[in-house]
């Protein structure tokens, strides 16, 4: 590892973004450890250290976070929808709370969390849970980067491409510009670029990357 390389601990490493982020971090010379349940050990990308545990219980893995200095929390309900209100509180909120506890216990230097764009006119329960997790991060004293995408376009997540013409118009009208940009669409590539940037450029306090900031990081993370 080079002097700029980091040891990154990831929860949600076998998920939609995590499974794509890990190889990218490894290719850039970082060391990665991924928390997985025992039945998912075979899904971890090659070259990544496996930590077996339960993301909903920090006790099951907090002693295995070290020597990582960066913690990336990606656990959450797949395909969020208003019908999953209960799951947001039993999975997203609990996993976020336990990740913060584990990170504090391990003395990590930087915490990375994928939240959601806010305020927004829909998905109230989802926004509330993500806001609660953000509050837990801030009150923990951790240095952190919080990413706030709205919808991530990529494999299996392509239907909103039909909305791009409407977004193009709304972003150019003074009355709707700010909201359209805050709740804009980002690509999976842009999210991965933003996550790599967050890992490699730790915040000095708590930094928020909104949709425009996420969009800016795609090309910088591929050099």
Image (tube, rainbow, N blue to C red):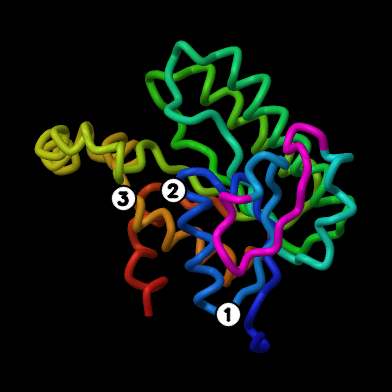
Task: Assign the N terminus to one quadrant of the image.
Answer: bottom right
State which region is magenta. 42-57
Q: Is residue 123 left or right of residue 215?
A: right
Q: Secondary structure at mark 3?
A: strand
Q: Within 10 angstroms of label 3, few (less than 14), some, or many (20 or more) residues?
A: some
**C-beta proximity under 8 Å, tags 2 and 1:** no
Proximity of marks 1 and 3: CB atoms separated by less than 8 Å:
no
Label 1 vs label 3, nearer the camera: 1
Label number found at residue 210: 2
Residue displayed at 26% across by 37% down: 180
Left or right for 194, reference 165: right
- What residue does disc 3 label? 187
Residue 117 locus on image (x, y percent): 44, 37
Q: Which residue is mark 1?
A: 29
**Which image quadrant for residue 39?**
top right
Query: Where residue 70 sits in the image (x, y, percent)?
Result: 70, 62
Q: Residue at x 34, y 36 (%)?
A: 183
- Rendered-image quadrant of the C terminus: bottom left
| For residue 212, side relative to residue 9 (left or right) | left
Q: Secondary structure at mark 1?
A: loop
Q: CA distance from mark 2 to mark 3?
A: 13 Å
Q: Residues within 10 Å of mark 1 (few under 14, many from 20)?
A: some
Q: Is residue 151 above or below residue 218?
A: above
């Amino acid at each position: 590892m080079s002097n700029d390389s980091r040891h990154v601990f990831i929860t949600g490493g076998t998920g939609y973004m995590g499974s794509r982020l890990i190889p990218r971090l490894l290719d850039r010379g970082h060391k990665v450890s991924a928390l997985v349940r025992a039945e998912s050990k075979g899904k971890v990308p090659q070259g990544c250290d496996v930590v077996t545990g339960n993301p909903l219980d920090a006790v099951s893995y907090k002693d295995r976070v070290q020597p990582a200095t960066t913690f990336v929390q990606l656990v959450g309900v797949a395909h969020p929808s208003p019908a999953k209100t209960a799951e947001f509180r039993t999975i997203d909120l609990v996993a976020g709370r336990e990740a913060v506890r584990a990170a504090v216990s391990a003395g990590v230097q930087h915490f990375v969390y994928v939240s959601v764009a806010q305020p927004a006119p829909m998905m109230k329960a989802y926004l509330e849970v993500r806001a609660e997790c953000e509050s837990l991060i801030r009150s923990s004293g951790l240095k952190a980067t919080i990413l706030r995408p709205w919808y991530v376009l990529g494999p299996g997540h392509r239907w909103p491409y039909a909305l791009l013409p409407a977004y193009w118009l709304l972003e150019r009208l003074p009355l709707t510009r700010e909201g359209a940009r805050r709740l804009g669409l980002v690509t999976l590539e842009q999210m991965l670029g933003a996550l790599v940037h967050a890992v490699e450029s730790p915040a000095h306090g708590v930094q928020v990357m909104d949709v425009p900031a996420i969009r800016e990081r795609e090309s910088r993370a591929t050099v």
